[in-house]
Image (cartoon, helix red, strand yellow):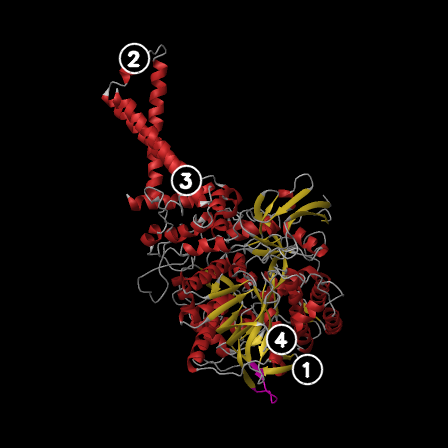
Amino acid sequence: MSNLQVSIYRYNPETDAAPYMQEFQVDTKGRDVMVLDVLHLMKEQDSSLAFRRSCREGVCGSDGMNMNGRNGLGCITPLSEVVKNGKLVLRPLPGLPVIRDLVVDMAMFYKQYERIQPYLQNDEPEPAIERLQSPEDREKLDGLYECILCACCSTACPSFWWNPDKFVGPAGLLQSYRFLADTRDTATRERLSDLQDPFSVFRCRGIMNCVAFCPKGLNPTRAIGKIREMLLADAT
Amino acid sequence: MSNLRSLTFDAIIIGGGGSGLRAALELAKSGKQTAVLSKVFPTRSHTVSAQGGITCAIGAADPDDDWRWHMYDTVKGSDYIADQDAAEYLCSEGPKAVFELEHMGLPFSRFDNGRIYQRPFGGQSKNFGEGGQAARTCAAADRTGHALLHTLYQNNLKNNTTFLNEWYAVDLVKNASGDVVGCIAMCIETGEVVHVKSKATVLATGGAGRIYASTTNALINTGDGVGMALRAGFPMQDMEMWQFHPTGIYGAGTLVTEGCRGEGGYLINKDGERFMERYAPNAKDLASRDVVSRSIVMEILDGRGAGENGDHVFLKLDHLGEEVLNKRLPGICELSKTFAHVDPVTEPIPVVPTCHYMMGGIPTNIHGQAIMQDDSGKDQIVNGLFACGEAACVSVHGANRLGGNSLLDLVVFGRSAGRFIEGALNEGIDYLDATDADIQSAMKRLERWNGSEDGESVPDLKRALQDIMQTDFGVFREEKKMQEGVKRLAELRERINNAYLPDKSNAFNTARVEALELDNLMEVAEATAISALERKESRGAHSRYDHPDRDDVNWLKHSIYCPKTKQLGKRDVNFRPKTVDTFEPKIRTY
Amino acid sequence: MVTSITSFSRNGVSDWLMQRVSAAVLAVYTVFMVAYLLFHPDLDYYTWSGLFEHTWMRIFSLLAFISLAAHAWVGLWTVTTDYLKSTYQRVGAQMLIILVIFVYLVWGIQLLWGA
């Protein structure tokens, strides 16, 4: 696939009445490069193409996008993983308002993150050294704290599409559980009482799109299940 | 009056990485009107890529550990041009700063007794180099930077810091007396340009690794703060000192943490020989980074490099076993599979020295206040301007930074800048307002790009710049090539001054941001090149074939690059720590 | 916390529990019915009506009807809040659903106990 055919979602609010798909021919010199590399080659052809990127190694979460129908990070997705029949279709993450081209407005996503109070709360006086935590207790945070806020999960979740203002979404809930599971956090009751309504957690229907698309291999559905168990234990 | 909208804050922090967020947190807690202005959403900052850990004598791995030992390692690692008062502050305040991070929720890995896990890193010793290898780097698996950055962002949310996310700072605004009174900034989403007024402007813009073609740095590391300060006429310190990390993944440049060698991994050449035993018989693979990087390059030049072109070596980890790798180095396993198509559990990772860190930067004191020299060469504070993190040169890293000291630098000096600014604001700061003409002069560059009608493209020029730096200012340097490089950079500057921005739209115009970044890369590259050419010795990361030895008679000094004259001056290194005896320069071996 | 007054319990945990418990009841009821029908291949009106003469069967059936009503309400309420973004449409649909469920429930009770 030396010459790759790329079809990409374009929209510039200043000049376009409606979004459209633009075709590009990209010469990858036969190498199995990452989708982000392809975007850079495309930007050299047309500098007006807009997309976010930063670390280019899958840890900053800037370049979440939809590649041939699957959400993922452009920088760690090699062409061999997504290209079908020599063609690549690139779209912005679904379900969020588009600012320009692949750049989406993530305000709603961040708002849900902020809503779960994503910081440690501990009302006991701070010791002179660190708070102690056993390796076993620390292990409970594995698979939770690694989230990079790329939004690949939440924007693949129909419940988040329909109720982005009320359903916290997989990313926010994963972080919520990260603090519920932290033995150093003392705000468990308050956190739970903020989540017991019919929307915040319970809009999760367990379809596991979030698990399928998380580029870091995390499992928000499992975390949501754990929150549900805690809510049930707390309320009955 | 200028027709720009203006925003007013007590303090504006440019950059949302570790040091910026730490400074902001301190100010937000004090109730000052603080804003963090960041060109990316804060958790996308490059701090997120730091892997191995934060070095600090908290005494978890060894209860007898002493911050003075850490200070000794830091000074020795710097090849003796770290300021010893600053290194003292870094190492002695470090434990407090690390415990604060833990209290904020940073999910450190743990020892069985519940204390923070610490691993060995390069250049660490006990008892002032006499007690063998120390384990002093506090880690959250191999994702310490990620954990640290997210924790700081979260705590800023908790304390209601104002964020101007996806805003780009264009240039500093100076008043008639030369004080910094804010900056010109652009909202990337809308293209709106505003005048940000502030009594304290903190440059926490990180490094500029993107001046090299091969770098571990994020694409956003374009030295924006250094560029702005240089254009405003402020000097830079030790800009020739660029750290090449021994283990960037061959081809991709992504970082493989020194923690791999800390956990017991080692480097091998094409014959499978553990060659670091020859170059650093004691510390071996945990010698400091400049030493290891040079050794790798020498192996390659001597024909013992691996691969078709014999241009890399291998990092062997498989002997550590799958369990250790998955528990301690899970991120490395992931990166290695993605970018080197190699599973470290079974195969060694192909690696090569890769540009990693800028030891130099905006000279500051331990309070983050930017420093310039008056006509007689005496230090003088720049009113209103502060810097911290990689953009600053306090200097605690001197000619070579130790692994794990960068994260500590961020939190210790971010915190100290925040505290100092809080105090200064309480005492009252009163600078002259900027006039329309002052604002106009800070707008020049943006207007130049917006008015450009024809010329070369930004990506082409950026590539040209990176090629010059890569070939002429790499791990080993020599007079002739550097002279050539400086000349080529001067020509390139002309071309960049006439470059063309085709897309003039306003909404999320990333082409405009990249054009503005190119100017900053140019400033950093030129400062680096001239400083490197003029420092006629080898010290730390700066190695010259034509001057292979350290010259303490002439060069036990900071270099000071002056952007107005493009000349290199000198500045005294501080040898007066407050509570410990001075560490006198010695021959540096590992 | 998100407040929503048209959810009867106004609480996700209780809605969720209600849906799970009612599902369990319906499952048991269904299994019972299928088994009953299989064991009575020549079922006639008298046998069938005889079954419903038993008080336990009437209670069991009533439980199943109530479960069905509750299950339907939680499920359909969720569907309306997902897909109907206009407040009037959503409230209208929810009222209609309540009405229909109520009518069916009353009718079911009448069938069971009215004879």
Q: Which residues are magenta?
A: B371-378
Q: Secondary structure at mark 1?
A: loop
Query: Which-is-in-front pick, marks 3 and 1?
Result: 3
Q: Is residue B118 left or right of residue C24?
A: right
Name the subunit of mark 1: B
| Residue sitting nearer the eye, B440 or B44 | B440
What's the distance in space between the residues labelled 4 and 2, CA to CA?
94 Å
Determine whether B525 is above or below B277 in the image: below
| Residue sitting nearer the eye, A77 or C83 | C83
Q: Secondary structure at mark 3?
A: helix
Residue A107 location in percent, x, y?
A: 50, 56
**Is most of the magenta stretch helix, strand or loop?**
loop
Amino acid type at circle 4 is Ala
Mark 3 packing: few (<14 Cα in 10 Å), some, or many (20+)? few
Quarter of the image for residue B244 reads: bottom right
Residue at the far bottom: name it.
B376
Query: Which-is-in-front pick, marks 4 and 1?
Result: 4
What's the distance in space between the residues labelled 2 and 1, CA to CA?
108 Å
What's the distance in space between the residues labelled 3 and 4, CA to CA?
59 Å
Query: Which-is-in-front pick, marks 2 and 1?
Result: 2
Q: Which mark is residue B565?
A: 1
> In the rendered structure, does residue B375 fall within the stretch colored magenta?
yes
Can residue B234 be seen? no
Q: Which mark is residue C92?
A: 3
Labels 3 and 2 in the same subunit: yes
Residue at the far top: name it.
C42
Q: Secondary structure at mark 4?
A: helix
Q: Which mark is residue B442?
A: 4
- Residue at the image point whose x is 62% and y is 72% from the top: B227
What's the distance in space between the residues labelled 4 and 1, CA to CA?
20 Å
